[in-house]
Amino acid sequence: VRSFYAGESGKLILTAMLFALIFQDPKIDVVAVLTTYIAALTVFWFALLIRKY
């Protein structure tokens, strides 16, 4: 269980660092990046729900 939480926290830290790096570029459309990220997470969770039932 401890390794699971370590992996999850590492993934969250890496995600936050990459978002911070991406948002340093003023040419990046923040809304498009966040919308795409949220859409990818939503598809993942819905796929898990569909597979469960």
Image (cartoon, rainbow, N blue to C red):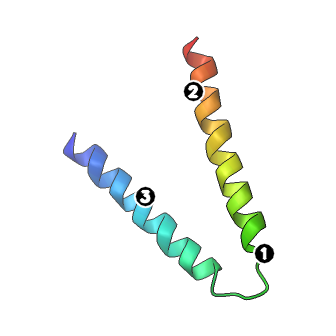
Which residue lies most toward the front here?
A: 31
* 11 and 35: which is toward the camera: 35
Kindly identify which residue carries mark 1. Answer: 29
Please, what is the three-letter code of the amino acid marked with disc 1? Asp
Q: Is residue 43 above or below residue 21?
A: above
27 displayed left or right of 5: right
Q: Residue at x 61, y 45 (%)?
A: 41
Q: Is residue 20 left or right of residue 6?
A: right
Choose the circle earlier in sequence order: 3 or 2: 3
Residue type indicated by callout 3: Lys
Q: Quadrant of residue 22?
A: bottom right
Residue linked to disc 2:
48
Q: Residue furthest left?
A: 2
Residue toward you, 33 or 18:
33
Residue 30, horizontal then vertical, whole percent: 72, 73
Q: Is residue 15 above or below residue 23?
A: above
Contact (Cβ within 8 Å) of mark 3 with mark 2 = no
